[in-house]
Amino acid sequence: MYLIIVGAGDIGTPLIEIATRSGNEVVVIERDDAKADRVASEHDCLVLNADATVRETLEDAGADRADAVISTTDQDATNVMVCLLAKEFDVPSILSVVHNPEHMSLFRQIGVNTMENPQELIAEHLYRSVARPAIVDYMRISEEAEVFEITVTGSAPIAGRTLQEAAQEGYLTGDTLVVAIEREESDKPITPRGDTRIESGDLLTVYSAVGADPEITDIFGHYEDTTE
């Protein structure tokens, strides 16, 4: 892919690393001299030490042939301007970081894919790791629904039962769905069926319409998670 990344700060820098390491053709726009020099010396990409809110800069970056423009600066106003300019070039995919939640609707109105305030996401993830140690990883789908990973313990009510049996006995309801199973002796994830038996030590990917509440994590044997 041909990617234009605007900003080489705390968010842009690891993104540049991932994008270049994955073999993409990357152009970075960074107006801070020191940051631009650092990226140019550390990564295999073209770096423009310029202002991305100027149309000519995006022209020089090759926006007319870019697959995506990703704006990662710490200023929402700058990100909005970059996205509006990128739309003039008909870039297929335009993404931006949004720091102030009140600005989210503005980005959506102009048709930009967004990532909400990354600092808040990190803070929420850190708190979740402390408050709910049983959850290996998670993604919030809506106000309540979540997809999360959790390991089945030996004392879990669901351990040793098939998914069908677990549903019949009331452990799994229509609000909870086991999406995938990772098992140590299996070289690839198991796609669960009704007759799939859950074993102690399984790492499950679970969808829950009500989130990873303690009543849900109890099913998988994590009784220590009693409070948020």
Image (tube, rainbow, N blue to C red):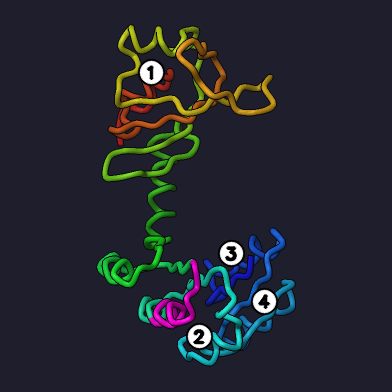
Tag 1 secondary structure = helix
Per the image, the residue denoted by label 3 is 15
Which quadrant is home to the C terminus?
top left
Q: What residue type is labelled 2?
A: Ala
Q: What residue type is labelled 1?
A: Ile
Look at discs 1 and 2 and give the one toward the viewer. Answer: 2
Per the image, the residue denoted by label 2 is 52
Whichever of callouts 2 and 4 sits on the residue coming sooner in the sequence is: 4
Per the image, the residue denoted by label 4 is 39
Q: What residue type is labelled 4?
A: Val
Q: Which range of residues does the magenta coloring cover?
A: 81-92
Check if mark 2's residue and mark 4's residue have beta carbons within 8 Å: no
Which quadrant is home to the N terminus?
bottom right
Tag 4 secondary structure = helix
Q: Residues within 10 Å of mark 1 (few under 14, many from 20)?
A: some
Q: What residue type is labelled 3?
A: Leu
Whichever of callouts 4 and 3 sits on the residue coming sooner in the sequence is: 3
